[in-house]
Image (cartoon, grey):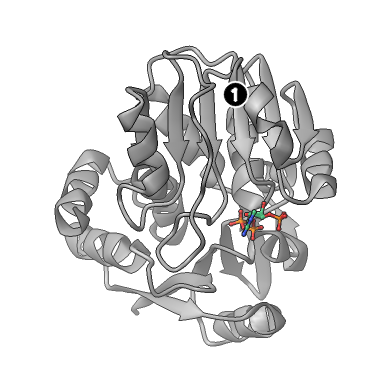
């Protein structure tokens, strides 16, 4: 029987996930099919329940549905519970089980970022931000900067790390004492407005991470590199969070993650 899985989001045409999972299905010799499903928020729940009835094994969930995915689940694994959002729904015996593999995905990214992070600034307060803040639990201080202050405040209350919520106008002051700046918004993604931030106040040793991966090198990353800062794009988190998701669908753990990263960089670069 073919394992049917996919990713539900809006927009979704940019997604590299079908390429990742379909390559891994072929690599490990499992009959599987991974599709991108474009669903507007009003139709999210009915679509997910239909996919479950159609015999799908589960789905990944991306912008803007991660909170809704958490809410419709019958059971929530601890990481999803911790974040209050889910990027993975597994369908089992008529039930929907939510998980959040973004947390482990971002932790894996942190292993390749050498500097010890003491003061991080997270831009955005959606589901991706929640997972990243959970992964930064050992960080000294995390400032959550969001257009809607109440959402940043809600994330701050849920977090284990020492956090505080701000609106964008606090950034120039915050950046002066920041050693890790992370964009979790969709700004800068192909087709979305630009992420325009003056990076001049950041200290010279600061690191920058952008979860956006289309384009591979966003204007935000280019600006950080032009300032001489180490800057990493979202492809790594995308691939690392896919490893536990693939395991949830198939029981198989992918070991050579870097091979996928290199091949995507070649395709997209
Ligand atoms: P996800 O769950 O994948 O993180 P999301 O919940 O839709 O996606 O979150 C997107 C984030 O990008 C939010 O923090 C959003 O800010 P608001 O909470 O104020 O909506 C932020 N974002 C999206 N478009 C934005 C824009 N044009 N300007 C500023 N922030 C934006």
Q: Nearer the viewer, residue 105 or 170?
A: 170
Q: Nearer the viewer, residue 131 or 2?
A: 131
Whether residue 234 appears in this view of the structure is: no
How crowded is the residue under tag 1: few (<14 C-alpha within 10 Å), some, or many (20+)?
many
Q: Nearer the viewer, residue 268 or 239?
A: 268
Q: Is 237 rendered above or below residue 160? A: below
The reply, left or right, for residue 266 in relation to residue 128 is left
Tell me the SS state at disc 1. Answer: helix
Q: Residue at x 61, y 35 (%)?
A: 122
Quarter of the figure with residue 73: bottom right
Indicate the position of residue 126 as horizontal and vertical percent values: 67, 52
Q: Residue at x 36, y 26 (%)?
A: 227
Residue at numbered disc 1: 175
Quarter of the figure with residue 53: bottom right
Which quarter holds ligand 1?
A: bottom right
Q: Is 246 rendered above or below residue 184? A: below
Is the residue at mark 1 in contact range of ligand 1, meaning its CB lies under 8 Å from it?
A: no
Q: Residue at x 60, y 23 (%)?
A: 175
Whether residue 48 appears in this view of the structure is: yes
The reply, left or right, for residue 261 in relation to residue 241 is left
Quarter of the figure with residue 149: top right
Q: Is 46 rendered above or below residue 126? A: below
Indicate the position of residue 93 as horizontal and vertical percent values: 63, 72
| Quadrant the N terminus occupies | bottom left
Indicate the position of residue 235 as horizontal and vertical percent values: 34, 47
């Amino acid at each position: 029987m073919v394992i049917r899985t996919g990713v539900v989001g809006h927009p979704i045409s940019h997604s590299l996930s079908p390429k990742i999972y379909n390559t891994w299905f072929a690599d490990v010799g499992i009959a599987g099919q991974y599709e991108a499903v474009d669903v507007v928020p009003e139709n999210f729940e009915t679509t997910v329940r239909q996919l479950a009835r159609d015999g799908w094994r589960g789905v990944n969930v991306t912008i803007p549905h991660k909170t809704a995915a958490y809410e419709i689940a019958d059971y929530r694994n601890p990481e999803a519970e911790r974040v209050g959002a889910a990027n993975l729904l597994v369908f089992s015996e008529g039930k929907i089980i939510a998980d959040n593999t973004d947390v482990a995905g971002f932790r894996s990214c942190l292993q390749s970022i050498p500097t010890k992070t003491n003061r991080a600034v997270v831009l955005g307060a959606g589901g991706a931000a929640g997972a990243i803040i959970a992964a930064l639990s050992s960080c000294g201080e995390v400032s959550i900067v969001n257009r809607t202050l109440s959402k940043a405040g809600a994330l701050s209350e849920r977090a284990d790390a020492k956090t505080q919520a701000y609106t964008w106008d606090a950034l120039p002051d915050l950046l002066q004492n920041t050693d890790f700046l992370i964009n979790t918004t969709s700004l800068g993604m192909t087709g979305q407005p630009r992420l325009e931030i003056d990076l001049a106040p950041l200290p010279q040793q600061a690191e920058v991470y952008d979860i956006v991966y289309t384009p591979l090198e966003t204007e935000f990353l280019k600006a950080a590199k032009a300032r001489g800062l180490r800057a990493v794009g979202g492809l790594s988190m995308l691939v690392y969070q896919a490893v536990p998701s693939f395991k949830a669908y198939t029981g198989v753990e992918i070991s050579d993650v870097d091979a996928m990263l290199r091949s995507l960089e070649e395709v997209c670069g």
